[in-house]
Amino acid sequence: MTLYVLDTSALVDAWNKWYSPQAIPRFWDLLEELAVQRGALIPDAVMVELEAVDDDLHKWCKANEKKLCIPASTEIQTVLAVISNKYPNLWRAGSPGRNLADPVVIACARHLGSAVVTHEQATGNLNGPRIPDVCRAESIRVLQMHQLVLEQGWVFR
């Protein structure tokens, strides 16, 4: 089974734009099932970002926290230190206080050998990188939520 580490941007866009729970509730059921199988995870740092970004999405994630959330273990923190040192501007990308989970998402993916699901766009510049830039530099597969849907063969009727 493919393992996916989900970034805040992918979850927020899915909730608010592409797979609204009012319009496509099945998406969220399937994401929960994937989490139960440990195929979809969110770092605890993403939970912190979600709390500040979207109340309803944060409530859904909190209700599924035991299935979805992966704490920053010692091993992940070790990888996080390497990523942070190698790409120090990743912390500073975007507005202040944002993107704090980005290095954690990448560190989780590196540690677990998983793909990253994000809706961030690459800058093409490792001096001002976003998640896709660092993932490509680190040979970590990066995709968007609709690609996860296609890979999983999810169909909504």
Image (cartoon, rainbow, N blue to C red):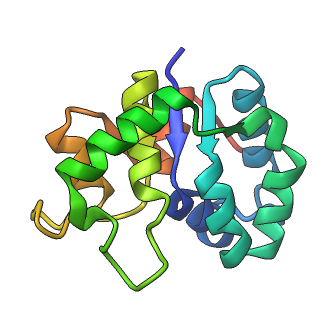
Q: Residue at x 83, y 36 (%)?
A: 66
Q: Nearer the viewer, residue 56 or 90?
A: 90
**Is residue 107 visible in the rendered structure shown here?**
yes
39 shown above or below 138 = above
Q: Quadrant of residue 82?
A: top left
Residue 18 position, x and y percent, is: 60, 64
Give the camera-side residue of 153 and 6.
6
Give percent across and percent down for residue 74: 53, 30
Residue 73 percent across, percent down from the top left: 58, 32
Using residue 125 as the reference point, say whether residue 69 is left or right of it. right
Residue closest to the far top: 1
Q: Quadrant of the N terminus?
A: top right
In the image shown, does 142 or 101 lie closer to the viewer?
Answer: 101
Q: Is residue 35 left or right of residue 141?
A: right
The quarter of the picture where the C terminus appears is: top right
Looking at this view, name the residue that lies furthest to the right.
63
Residue 115 x, y percent position in the rendering: 41, 33
Q: Is residue 133 above or below residue 81?
A: below
